[in-house]
Image: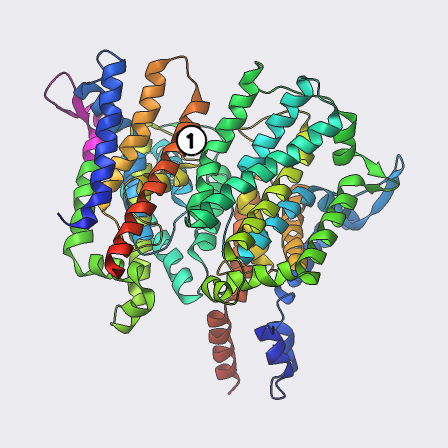
């Protein structure tokens, strides 16, 4: 399978600049570099990393640390989007997982079992979405809208099962996974890296990855070629549910509470944005895991930069919107060729 | 009977069934008073959803509605504080809605970026703009707003139709005319039905796409005006999540998200069904907000499955 960028790279007549600009990693990397350049300009100590109480501290570590939940959700989202789907329910899955964790810990289950139950809940949500999309053949955006609308309500209901609106919990195991650290490095970074590696192997080193992209490229053709499109779509939503559940574990352990109304709010939008900034098309057929993580980092770097730059946090959304628009406009072939044309015209 | 009216009919039947259920459960539920209240309380969201119907009919989506509702309210409230007449600021915001929507349409069409992403950026931009203007709720003191809120037409029974509901119904009538009796409306259905065919038949894609999103922007700005006048305040968090309620209203109203199939009138009943559920749960008293969300999700599920089977039976009949 060749990407259009690779083919362009082999064409002898293409200018080098155009080849470099055509690579999909360029624009997100440029965006990240630009954000960091502005940061370095505004606050000179931005890139300092020091060791406090036996762990790494610094803005760069903070960006990585905070980007983990979004990045993990975005990885699952990238796979679903690769099959020409979309999963709007990830925020609700995070809310349900948080509520279930708090509930089971209050019920006295061993914490290891609670972790397994939490992941099981994610799988269950993935199973539901997969059933709607693959079996009932409902448009993914609507199918997952159902769980998105009702999921936070389900979380609230679970909280009400044992009384209390925002119950809190303590768990050494879960909090260790979320806010603890292995040696110098935060645990969630290590585990996030492990999830990335596992998904990368799954997508790039097994047939499943090929099937996922085939189904996204052309579901009917893949079906005719003997790929069970239904099963493959199921797999995508299961993986996405699992990823969302993991983010739910991290976020619930981070805040020590179950707050279904506000936990992971807008995370589905951030995750989709990460995939798109990473060059993934909502039209499906391509899964770029590394690029997706890069996209999540761009979003988090932006958020952290706005907070450290001294701008009021109210500016966060507006700046984010502008960066998103600029990155997307630069990725648009139509606009780029129009710009090239006017540039060439002026030279003549 | 024409098959295209079936989903609309199903929506109306569900609405009536829910209304009758409420009447059997609670005394005084089956009255024009309750009906008028549901219309007035949900007028802003139904108005916004009417614009979304056009966007969805064309196969697109608009996520910027909720933020537009909030932004319009905040601007009107702040202009009120410096002495603008609410009608003048409302007119300006309606024009802004048209421009903003048109710009979104231009980016979608010219840069070939998915509507989902472009309008998502619109959502962030407008909500962020709300926060930049102010973080608290700002009251609108102008006497015209109080006068507007007091306007109503008596309905048979003890109910009355409030001004917000009247504005909504008038804009609905205009939307029905635009959708079913103009060339633009036909173009919207054509693009939603089959984009390539529409292009080959000579539908002006750029102009129509821009007009569709401009119309969506106009109606969501109108929803924002209704909301600001109805609550006589501008609150930067107003309308959060309303884009999903609007989309749900459109889907419940029998419009297919794949585009090309549906009726604008259905959106009224779709929005009314969601409002009715909230009213029913409020009447009960012992249930809470969690139930509204869950019931909304369940209803959405039932409707979508029903639509699927309807569309499926059409296809079967067509192929046999």
Q: Which residue is at the far front?
A: B320
Q: Quadrant of the C terminus of chain B?
A: bottom left
Which residue is at 65% across, 32% downward?
A118
Instruction: Name the chain under label 1.
Output: B
* Rendered location of residue A184, percent (x, y): 87, 42
Q: Where is residue A132 in the image (x, y as percent from the top left)?
A: 45, 44
User: Vertically, is B122 above or below B203?
Assistant: above
Q: Is residue B302 magenta?
A: no
x then y, percent, for residue B68: 39, 42
Q: What stretch is highlighted in magenta?
A: B146-167
Q: Is mark 1 on a helix, strand or loop?
A: loop
Point out residue A172 in the picture as x, y percentages from the top left corner: 79, 26
Asked whether residue B85 appears in the rendered view, the answer is: no
Q: Is residue B42 above or below residue B57?
A: above
* Total count of labels: 1
Instruction: Answer above or below: position of B24 versus B233.
Output: above
Query: Which residue is painted at 76% across and 35% down in the image?
Result: A177
Residue where numbered disc 1 is placed? B235
Tell me which corner region of the image, top left, top right, bottom left or bottom right, holds residue B272. Answer: top left
- Foreground residue among A323 and B51: B51
Look at the image and tell me whether residue A61 can be seen.
yes
Q: Quadrant of residue B6?
A: top left
Give whichever of B202, B269 is nearer the camera.
B269
Tell me what residue is drawn at x 52 percent, y 61 percent: A215
- For image coordinates 75% across by 29% down, the residue present is A112
Determine whether, in the image, residue A74 is placed left or right of residue B7.
right
Give the crowd class for mark 1: few <14, some 14-19, many >=20 residues within 10 Å.
many
- Which image quadrant for residue A165? top right
């Amino acid at each position: 399978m060749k990407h259009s960028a690779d083919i362009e790279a082999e064409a002898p007549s293409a200018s080098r600049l155009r080849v470099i600009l055509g690579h999909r990693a360029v624009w997100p990397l440029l965006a990240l570099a630009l954000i960091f350049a502005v940061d370095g300009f505004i606050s000179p100590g931005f890139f300092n990393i020091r060791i406090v109480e036996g762990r790494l501290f610094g803005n760069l570590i903070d960006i990585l640390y905070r980007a983990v939940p979004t990045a993990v959700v975005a990885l699952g989202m990238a796979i679903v989007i690769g099959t020409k789907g979309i999963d709007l329910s990830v925020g609700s899955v995070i809310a349900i997982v948080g509520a279930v964790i708090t509930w089971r810990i209050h019920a006295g289950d061993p914490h290891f079992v609670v972790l397994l139950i939490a992941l099981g809940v994610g799988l269950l949500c993935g199973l539901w979405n997969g059933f709607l999309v693959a079996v009932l053949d409902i448009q993914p955006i609507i199918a997952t809208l159902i769980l998105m609308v009702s999921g936070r309500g389900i979380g609230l209901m679970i909280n009400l099962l044992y009384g209390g609106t925002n119950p809190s919990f303590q768990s050494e195991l879960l909090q260790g996974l979320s806010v603890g650290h292995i040696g110098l490095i935060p645990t969630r970074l290590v585990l996030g890296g492990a999830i990335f590696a596992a998904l990368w192997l799954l997508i790039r080193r097994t047939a499943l990855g090929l099937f996922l992209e085939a189904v996204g490229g052309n579901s009917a053709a893949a079906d005719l070629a003997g790929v069970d499109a239904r099963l493959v779509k199921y797999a995508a939503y299961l993986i996405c549910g699992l990823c969302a559940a993991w983010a739910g574990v991290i976020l619930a352990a981070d805040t020590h509470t179950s707050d279904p109304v506000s936990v992971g709010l807008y995370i589905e939008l951030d995750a989709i944005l990460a995939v798109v900034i990473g060059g993934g098309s909502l039209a499906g057929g391509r899964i770029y895991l590394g690029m997706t993580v890069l996209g999540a980092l761009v979003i988090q770097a932006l958020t952290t930069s706005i907070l450290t730059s001294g701008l009021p946090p109210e500016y966060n959304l507006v700046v984010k919107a502008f960066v998103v628009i600029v990155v997307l406009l630069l990725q648009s072939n139509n606009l780029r060729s129009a710009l090239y044309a006017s540039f060439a015209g002026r030279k003549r | 009977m024409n098959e295209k009216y079936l989903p609309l009919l199903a929506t109306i039947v569900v609405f009536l069934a829910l209304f009758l259920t409420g009447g059997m459960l609670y005394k005084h539920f089956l009255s024009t008073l309750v009906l008028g209240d549901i219309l007035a309380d949900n007028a802003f969201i139904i108005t916004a959803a009417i614009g979304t119907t056009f966007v969805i009919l064309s196969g697109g989506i608009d996520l910027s509605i909720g933020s537009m509702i909030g932004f319009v309210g905040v601007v009107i409230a702040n202009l009120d504080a410096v002495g603008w007449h609410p009608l003048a600021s409302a007119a300006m915001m309606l024009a802004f809605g048209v421009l903003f929507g048109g710009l979104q349409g231009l980016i979608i069409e010219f840069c070939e970026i998915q509507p989902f992403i472009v309008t998502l950026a619109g959502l962030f931009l407008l909500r962020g703009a709300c926060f930049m203007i102010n973080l608290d709720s700002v009251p609108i003191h102008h006497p015209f707003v109080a006068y507007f809120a007091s306007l109503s037409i008596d309905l048979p029974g003890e109910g009355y139709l409030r001004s917000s509901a009247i504005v909504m119904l008038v804009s609905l009538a205009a939307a029905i005319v635009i959708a079913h009796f103009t060339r633009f409306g036909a173009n919207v259905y054509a693009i939603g039905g089959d984009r390539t065919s529409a292009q080959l038949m000579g539908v002006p894609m750029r102009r129509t796409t821009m007009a569709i999103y401009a119309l969506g922007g106009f109606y969501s700005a109108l929803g924002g005006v209704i909301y600001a006048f109805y609550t006589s305040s501008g609150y930067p968090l107003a309308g959060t999540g309303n884009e999903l309620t609007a989309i749900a209203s459109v889907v419940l109203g029998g419009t297919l998200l794949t585009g090309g199939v549906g009726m604008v009138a259905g959106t009224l009943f779709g929005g009314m069904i969601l409002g009715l559920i909230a009213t029913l749960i409020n009447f009960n008293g012992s249930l809470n907000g969690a139930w509204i969300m869950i019931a909304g999700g369940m209803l959405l599920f039932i409707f979508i499955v029903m639509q699927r089977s309807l569309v499926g039976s059409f296809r079967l009949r067509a192929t046999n």
